[in-house]
Image (cartoon, rainbow, N blue to C red):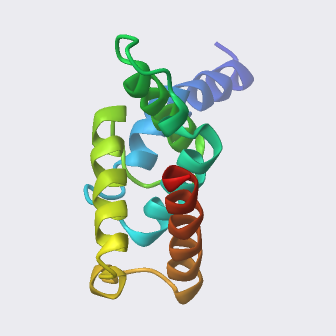
């Protein structure tokens, strides 16, 4: 085996596959951080699950699976969660926002992330209530 072939074989073995990259990237955190909430709220605002057809088997859950896929594609999203977990987190965010306890949820993140999360929460709450 030539030196070039040996180097190519080594490079191909050491480069992780896309599935391995995703697994490595999502192993950053187990719990949601402020940046994850922002990414989730952006996706929810784009997909608007409250407009999902009612009475269709898994209508809303299909939308949240799409949201999970969208969030997973975002490099800032640092948790690996299925649609069910994202729906639960979204419900928690809305409940806490309506109770005006956003300040107590500020364990990590930047001021900009909190401001965007609060702005997105207002936008979503307004749309859901309409």
Nearer-the-camera pick, 2 or 103: 103
Q: Position of residue 49 (x, y in %)?
A: 50, 36
Q: Position of residue 31 (x, y in %)?
A: 26, 60
* Relative to 36, 102 lies left or right: left
Q: Position of residue 78 (x, y in %)?
A: 43, 55
Nearer-the-camera pick, 86 or 13: 86
In the rendered image, the residue lying farthest to the right is 4
Considering only vertical position in the picture, is 71 above or below 37?
above
In the rendered image, the residue lying farthest to the front is 130
Q: Residue at x 64, y 44 (%)?
A: 46
Report the label total: 0
Q: Residue at x 57, y 65 (%)?
A: 120
Is residue 118 at all visible to an observer of this figure? Answer: yes
Q: Residue at x 49, y 61 (%)?
A: 125
* Relative to 43, 35 lies left or right: left
Q: Residue at x 57, y 46 (%)?
A: 43
Nearer-the-camera pick, 17 or 107: 107
Is residue 17 at all visible to an observer of this figure? Answer: no
Picture quarter containing residue 61?
A: top left
If the image is split into quadrants, where does the N terminus sit? top right
């Amino acid at each position: 085996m030539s030196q070039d072939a040996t180097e190519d074989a080594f490079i191909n073995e050491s480069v992780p596959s896309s599935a391995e990259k995703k697994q490595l990237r999502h192993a950053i955190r187990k719990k949601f951080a402020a940046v994850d909430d922002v990414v989730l709220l952006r996706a929810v605002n784009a997909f608007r699950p409250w407009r999902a057809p009612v009475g269709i088997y898994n209508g809303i859950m299909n939308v949240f699976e799409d949201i999970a896929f969208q969030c997973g594609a975002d490099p800032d999203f640092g948790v690996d969660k299925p649609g069910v977990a994202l729906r639960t987190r979204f419900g928690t965010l809305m409940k806490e926002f309506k109770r005006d306890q956003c300040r107590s949820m500020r364990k990590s993140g930047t001021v900009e992330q909190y401001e965007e999360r609060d702005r997105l929460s207002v936008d979503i709450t307004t749309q859901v209530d309409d």
